[in-house]
Amino acid sequence: MRINIQEINDVTLLELDGPLAGSSSICLADVVSKSVSAGKTKFVIDMEHVTFVDSSGLGALVVALKAVQQYSGQIRIASLGLQVYLIFELTRLNRLFEICPDKREAMRSFDLPPEKFWRSRSTLISSASKLAV
């Protein structure tokens, strides 16, 4: 899985690409943990390109939420595909997370103007290279 990280004002946007399972779950938890340690408390996790989530992926999302909430932070989940949304419903995570139809709506929920979203600087991280270090 790849994670594209963008800092937009005080919101961290994490765009996931690939299955959220196994070792990629560790990478997601690590990225959120480092961001929280750096003082970030608002997150949008864009799952538009996530085609599969297993129990370790769901666990990583819950761990991330708990870490962020310890600092009165918030996580928005955006762009869930039907299969992944059904997993969220089945596990009742749709009640734990605020789910937005897309990343623009999720960003707006933090009161950011959309033009700020498209002008941000981004960094690309590959979970495979991250774990190899």
Image (tube, rainbow, N blue to C red):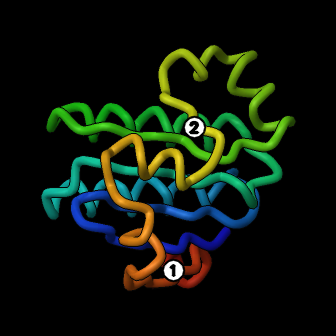
Residue appearing at x 75%, y 31% in the figure: 85
What residue does disc 1 label?
A: 125
Residue 117, by quadrant, is bottom left
Label 2: state its secondary structure.
Answer: strand
Residue 58, by quadrant, is top right
Compared with residue 102, is residue 126 higher up or lower down, i.e. above or below? below
Quadrant assignment for the C terminus: bottom left
Q: Label 1 amino acid?
A: Ile
> Is 85 situated left or right of 9 in this image?
right
Query: Which numbered marker is on residue 96?
Result: none
Mark in the foreground, 1 or 2 = 2
First-in-chain label (1 vs 2): 2
Which residue sits furthest right? 83
> Is 63 situated left or right of 66 in this image?
right
Residue appearing at x 62%, y 49% in the figure: 102
Label 1: state its secondary structure.
Answer: strand
Give percent across and percent down for residue 68.
Answer: 27, 40
Give percent across and percent down for residue 30.
Answer: 39, 60
Q: Residues within 10 Å of mark 1 (few under 14, many from 20)?
A: some
Compared with residue 131, is residue 22 higher up or lower down, i.e. above or below? above
Give percent across and percent down for residue 96.
Answer: 48, 20
Q: Label 2 amino acid?
A: Cys
What separation in Å lies between label 1 and label 2 (alpha carbons)?
24 Å
What residue does disc 2 label?
A: 100
